[in-house]
Image: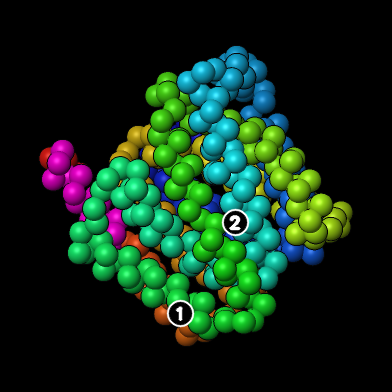
């Protein structure tokens, strides 16, 4: 990770993010969503454990200025949203899940208006409307089908990621990206235990565990590549550049998801998904471009 500059780290994160919905879909029928989350976050923590021990960083997670932030990142950034998306992937496709994730832009505007007092411009509202139209196209095309259930879970979940970004930006500046990624995984693992118990109690999870090389591959990707290395790359990017710029780039990840998913047979090319993808990406990029342009005018730099 040290060899990557912030821009390279950002594009690496885009690639990892684009593939994770496909990996989540392959996990269906192999491992239950809650157990997938538990094992993946545990692997991420174990991956970083020697480095954390060598640099004596374990104690930083329990200090007054970091403990609550990591609790919120672990729960709202990983444990709750990823578990719900894994459950959604039991029903819907990776492409649908990735495209519907663009509704996060809408949640961003709403949260900014509530907590920061920001008022959206006309162009921001236009971009938001395009995102909503793209999402509605997907939902309308899948209405009352088994995929529709998964689609609804996704759009009711992704607001949590925005909350996680807010907490991450408040962490002390001296924390390296690897330490942030490890801390998020650590607290996600802790919170996934009671969440898994609740889901099992109310039969909201599926009981599946099929040992084999496919399971090992899925756990390696989700734990080491996605939660450990991918998150570290993302934090290296956003700690060294404007968040709106990074967001504008990572918004393109559904294109990767769609392409990989079609090639691997978990999705098929169809007009509904293509139209929803174009509208959602166009609207999301428009909103983010306006935010980036506004910050450029305020600071005088790109």
Image spot of residue 201 (x, y percent)? 81, 52
**What's the residue at 59%, 56% (across, down)?**
20
Quarter of the image holding residue 52? top right
Residue 230 quadrant: top right
Q: Looking at the picture, how far across and down is residue 193, in whole percent? A: 74, 40
Q: Is residue 78 above or below residue 274?
A: above
Dot 1 alpha-carbon crowd within 10 angstroms: few under 14, some 14 to 19, many 20 or more: many
Q: Which residues are magenta?
A: 286-299
Residue that carries the numbered disc 2 in the rendered image: 20
Which secondary structure type mostly characterizes the magenta part of the structure? Answer: helix
Relative to 77, residue 279 above or below: below
Q: Is 66 one of the magenta-colored residues?
A: no
Q: Is residue 12 visible to the viewer in this orientation of the structure?
A: no
| Apparent side of residue 295 relative to residue 65 in the rendered image (left or right) | left
Task: Determine if the magenta segment contains residue 290.
Answer: yes
The chosen color scheme is rainbow
Q: Which residue is at a point 70% across and 31% down the rendered structure image? A: 46
Q: Position of residue 267 (x, y in %)?
A: 60, 75
Which residue position is annotated with label 1? 137
Q: Nearer the viewer, residue 221 or 2?
A: 221
């Amino acid at each position: 990770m040290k060899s990557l500059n912030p821009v390279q780290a950002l594009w690496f994160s885009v690639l990892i993010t684009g593939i994770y919905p496909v990996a989540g879909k392959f996990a269906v029928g192999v491992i239950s969503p809650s157990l997938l989350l538990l094992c993946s976050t545990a692997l991420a923590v174990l991956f970083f454990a020697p480095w954390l021990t060598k640099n004596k960083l374990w104690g930083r997670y329990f200090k007054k200025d970091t403990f609550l932030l990591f609790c919120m990142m672990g729960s709202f950034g990983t444990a709750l949203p990823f578990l719900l998306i894994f459950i959604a992937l039991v029903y819907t496709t990776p492409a649908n899940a990735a495209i519907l994730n663009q509704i996060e832009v809408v949640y961003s505007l709403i949260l900014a208006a509530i907590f920061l007092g920001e008022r959206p411009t006309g162009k921001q509202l236009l971009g938001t409307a395009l995102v909503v139209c793209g999402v509605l196209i997907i939902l309308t095309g899948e209405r009352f089908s088994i995929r529709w259930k998964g689609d609804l879970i996704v759009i009711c979940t992704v607001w949590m990621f925005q909350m996680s970004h807010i907490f991450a930006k408040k962490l002390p500046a001296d924390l390296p990206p690897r330490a942030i990624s490890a801390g998020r995984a650590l607290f996600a693992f802790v919170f996934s235990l009671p969440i898994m118990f609740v889901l099992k109690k109310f039969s909201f999870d599926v009981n599946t565990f099929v040992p084999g090389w496919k399971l090992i591959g899925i756990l390696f990707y989700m734990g080491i590549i996605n939660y450990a290395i991918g998150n570290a790359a993302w934090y290296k990017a956003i700690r060294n550049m404007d968040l709106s710029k990074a967001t504008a780039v990572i918004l393109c990840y559904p294109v990767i998801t769609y392409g990989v998913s079609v090639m691997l047979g978990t999705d098929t090319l169809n007009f509904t998904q293509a139209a929803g993808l174009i509208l959602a990406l166009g609207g999301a990029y428009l909103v983010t471009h306006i935010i980036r342009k506004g910050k450029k005018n305020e600071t005088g730099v790109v």
